Structure formats: C-alpha cells, structure tokens
Image (tube, rainbow, N blue to C red):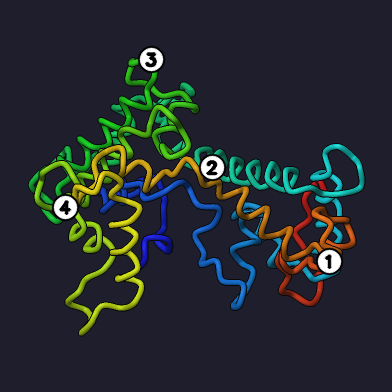
Amino acid sequence: MMRSMLACLALCVVVGSSKPTEKKSRVHDEEPLSQLEHNDNKNFDYDHEAFLGHDEAKTFDQLPPEESKRRLGIMVDKIDSNRDGFVSEDELKVWIKNAQKKHVLDSVERQWSDFDMNNDGLISWDEYKNVTYGSYLDDPQADSEYNYTHMMARDERRFRVADTNGDLIADKVEFTAFLHPEDHEHMKDVVVQETIEDIDKNGDGFIDIQEYIGDMYNAEDEEEDPEWVESERQQFSEFRDKNKDGKMDKEETLDWILPSDYDHAEAEAKHLLHESDANQDGKLTKKEILDKFDVFVGSQVTDFGEALLRHDEF
C-alpha cells in the first residue's frame, strides 16, 4: 500500500492489557489530519476530521442536517477571528491546526491515568515500562512472538529524548512528545533513526531503493508491479535520493518523512476554500460555508432523538 495511505500514528501504546502486544512505533510522516483516505469522489470524511478533529467529527455524524448547519454557523463566527465577516485561508488554517492540536492533547489525556500509577501528575519511565511490559518483565520466556527486549529499548530511547530534563520522569509536555514525536523539533532525530532501523534490511545505515519499495510493496503479491510502484521508483531517483548515490541518508530520510516545505493544515485550508468559494474572491462568507456544509461537517441521522448530543458551547 502506498506510503501516503499508511496510518501514521506515532505510537500505539498498550493500555489495560495483561501482556504487551505488537506496537507500531515508527513514525512514517507528520501526524495526519485524518487516518481516512482523502477522496472527495467517495465522501468528505477526511475533510470532516481535518476540520473538526476526530472526536467532534463523530459527534457531527450523528446530527441531523439542520443541527449540523446550526453548529457549523457558530463555528464560522469563531473562525472569523478578525470579525470582518469573512473566513480567510489563514483563519481556516489556524482553526484546523487547533483542531488537530486538541485531538493530540485529548489522546494524551485519555492515556494519562493508565500510566500515572501513583497519581502524582507525572509518568516515570518505570511506570510506563511496567504498565506496557509488565507481564514480559515478570516472565520473559512466556511469550516469544515479538522481540520485546528490542521494543522496550526503542521505547526507552524515545522516552529519554522526550525527557528534556533527563530525570526519566515525564510531565504532560514530555509525554506528549514521546507519544507524538513528529510534532516536536527535538524528536526528529529519533524519528529518523527509527524509520531507518525499520526499513534498512541490510544494516548499512541507509535506505536503498529496494528497501524503500519493499517497505511499501511486496512484489510476490502481484505478477507485475502496479503503476504506482514505478512512480515511487521515479520519486526515489529524482527527489528522495538528492545526492544521487543510490540510497537515502539521515538527512534525505528526514526530508522524506517530515518535509519542511509541506503543511497539511495549509493544504487542507486551500482545499476547503477551493471547494466552497462560490464567487472565487479568495475568502468565504458564512453563506458560502453553510451552502457547502457537507464538505466541512458530517450529518447522517434524520431526526433529533437520542442521537442529538448537545455540547455546552452550542
């Protein structure tokens, strides 16, 4: 499957389990605005999650159109920060970034109590290790399905990088960096290191074209390579491998997984503007947004009933 379609969760932590399970600790890319496919020909679900955040998008999916539009109208007034009666691309971008930031913080909050075992408002490495790997630590021979020693070492390395004061105790800012390293400048080196370790099959510290393609596609599954594979080969040769030595080093890998010249929120803001700007003046009125409310927010039910989940702000 193409890398652009991969889930990019920073860390799938183990919560409330008697033994650790396989974790995806590699970060493939900047934290996405949504894990869903962005295909407007099918639906606008990606746009809903990008604009609202994951949890709020689920709430809107349960609302009737009238209520969905009403709440969107209230949001438009909040997005229009300079109160000029229009929503600009920059205002949309700020709103989207804030929605995604809230999603990350909510994710950390949901997991916090599972690891803060002594309820002191901090999470030590020992607490995290014992919750995540407790059963393995008690009996390392009980389950050999995964290399938990390696997984635990990677977690500790990431934890130490996130732990900026070096006391092996994380506050919420540090724990957020541990769970979502792609959003933090000081975490980029460890993100690159994890990526190379996972893809570099020959252990030379680089990613060659065979390893790059092999991470996305198993040639044994098809009689001939699909077109996108050839496109990825061309991408590697022309853009990924900048110094043309046939492999990606750490700097080239960083440019690949965390490109500094691409802003997901900005791209989504441009997309929403393009979809809704009826008079093509480069800004949106409330009417233009509400006329295209299905692009911004979801709505599936046809009556209020029990599904109408009202929030205080609405």
- Judged from the image, the secondary structure of the residue bearing numbered disc 3 is loop
Closer to us: mark 3 or mark 1?
1
- N-terminal of the two: label 2 or label 3? 2
- Judged from the image, the secondary structure of the residue bearing numbered disc 2 is helix
Residue on which the image places disc 1: 278
**From mark 2 to mark 1, how far is it between C-alphas?**
33 Å
Residue on which the image places disc 3: 165
Residue beneath the point at 21% across and 63% down: 214
The answer to whether residue 221 is above or below residue 279 is: below
Residue beneath the point at 80% across and 64% down: 68
**From mark 4 to mark 1, how far is it between C-alphas?**
54 Å
**From mark 4 to mark 3, how far is it between C-alphas?**
32 Å
Mark linked to residue 104: 2
In the figure, is residue 271 to the left or right of 283? left
Residue 47 visible in the picture: yes
Q: Are marks 4 and 1 in contact (CB under 8 Å)?
A: no
Report x, y in % for residue 46.
59, 63
**From mark 2 to mark 3, how far is it between C-alphas?**
22 Å
**From mark 3 to mark 1, how far is it between C-alphas?**
52 Å
- N-terminal of the two: label 3 or label 1? 3
Report x, y in % for residue 113.
47, 36
Closer to us: mark 2 or mark 4?
2
